[in-house]
Image (spheres, helix red, strand yellow):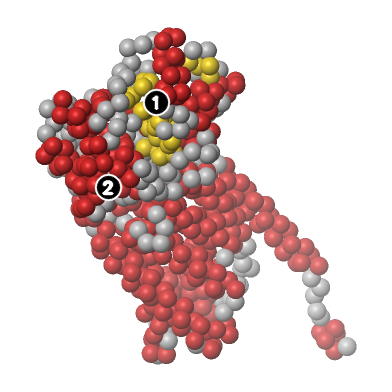
Amino acid sequence: MNELQFLTWVRGPGLNLAISIFLLGVFVRLFEIYSLGRKKDLSEPRNVGGASGINTVFRRSLPAEGMLKKSPISYIGGYIFHIGLAIIVFLFVPHIKFFQGLLGISWPGLPSQLVEFVTIVTIVTMLVILLDRITNPVKRYLSTFQDWFTWALTFLPVLTGWLAVRHLLLPYTTMLAVHILMVELLLVFLPFTKLFHAFTVFGSRWFNGTVNGHKGVAV
Amino acid sequence: MRHEDGILMAGLAQHGVSRRSFMKFCATLASVMALPPAAGLAMAEAMASARRPSVIWLPFQECTGCTESITRSHSPTIESLIFNVISLDYQETLMAAAGHQAEEALQQAIKDNFGKYLLIVDGSIPLGMDGAYSTIGGRSNLEILKEVAKGAAAIVAMGSCAAYGGIPKANPNPTGAVSVADVIKDKPIVNVPGCPPIPVVMTGVLAHYLTFGSLPELDKLGRPKAFYGETIHDRCYRRSFYDQGKFAKTFDDEGARNGWCLFELGCKGPVTYNACATTKWNGGTSWPVESGHGCLGCSEPDFWDAGSFYKALSMPATPLKTVGVAAAAGAAVGVAISFANRAKKSAAKAAHETTTLPDLEK
């Protein structure tokens, strides 16, 4: 298999396989989680649950009181790399073309230098977050294999994408193929690891907020 | 076609090429090939005194586009004149002889210059049905190639078909087409891919061979690095528009008229290694991207099967066939799991024993 055949495989059959596993996993887990249901709470609600739920969806995106000072790297770094990933994934023109190819819809992108700047910031931030996880004894103690694994799954597509654009390490064709392969690995593992929070984060926040509201925790 | 042995410079002089313009040509060639400045002089001296090398050109499964590219290069250029003055002893398209006479000329050339001639091949070699898909004089391409390659000093696989199998090898490859390098393993082979290849690349390889007696430095796909060292995209004059995010969306929109990047229209420039963007075509007149069409990637192996020419490189190369089925299967499995979970819950509920006050007092 030569470079172009490798690229064509990851753009064709490989992509098909990865998206198939991704969708299969996403649907299995969404049905599994949301069909579990919960026993009806017969107690008198102390607050209106719905408002509490929506409030929690937004409130938990902000650090709890005092936490920003206590754990600045987690919060600031977390913000930066999540926003960075969103910009890279959704506003880089070749990526928009990818979504257009899949979904048929497109939107305006950003100049590639700007996206590259965001990419470098994201890479550095993710490295700092990793270093923090390694050096902070509490975080290291709490980390399981999945934490390191999902970090790598998220980091490698960004790194290889940037290396491809900059023509570093490998010829562009090969690096582009490696980049797409890394994205495919991310897609394959996303539904079955904690990366699934991409789908469940707001749902679970709403759920917790509603339950807490029902029990009387202030909105 | 056959010339008596002679000096290249004399042949050029006959065509009105002065020594000065020949020197200029050599210097340009040396710089195009990224050789040191002194190499231009060495090249000129070596080529001027070179005896016309015997060249045998074998056409297999091809369309003659490669021959057209070389012979119709903007005339009269020194490239085309060099082709005129090499001793092209066998070239079916160009030679006057036909039939048995032509085959005799081939045998004679092999005999006269055994071990010294340069073999140029254009077209792929079919292996299917024992090579019966393409025969010359009743003999299969495979048989002829093996025989002629034995006495060759070096082989130039001219065009994407000879270099990598090209269009004949495209899926489903009905003739079992392969490249020269798939058949010949014991001779130095230079791949000059392209559909067709650029004439100056061919001249460059010839000049290098005449000057240094060796083939130029090759990349891992067997292509001269001097010409195939960089991608079309990196040397493209439209590259700045790519960086600015300015793209033509259709072939006749404002972006196309402003000469913006053709990436979104399927240009394969980013993954194509060739010299079109620097040497251009037709005597430097233009080249595909300059004329408003994206690069097809014709100098890359299996470019024919690398997805649509008009789909952006970042789009899926082939339709995603099993995605719908997978989503439906996922939903079905999810529903099945939810039923299993509910059954478990009901079973737990049914098995639940109520604790009464006397139980607690026990």
Mark 2 lies on residue: B33
Query: What is the three-letter code of the residue carrying label 2?
Result: Met
Which class describes the residues within 10 Å of circle 1: few (<14), some (14-19), or many (20+)? many
Give whichever of B140, B112 is nearer the camera.
Answer: B112
Identify whether B347 is placed above or below A174: below
State which chain disc 2 sits on: B
Q: Amino acid at mark 1?
A: Ile
For the residue carrying disc 2, how many other residues have a C-alpha within 10 Å: few (<14), some (14-19), or many (20+)? many
Q: Secondary structure at mark 2?
A: loop
Say above or below: B51 vs B23: above
Can residue B226 be seen from the camera position used here? Answer: yes
Q: Nearer the viewer, residue B82 or B241?
A: B82
Q: Which residue: 55% across, 56% down?
A: A188
**Is residue B293 shown left or right of residue B342?**
left
| Residue A24 place in picture, x, y as percent | 57, 51
Residue A77: quadrant of the picture: bottom left
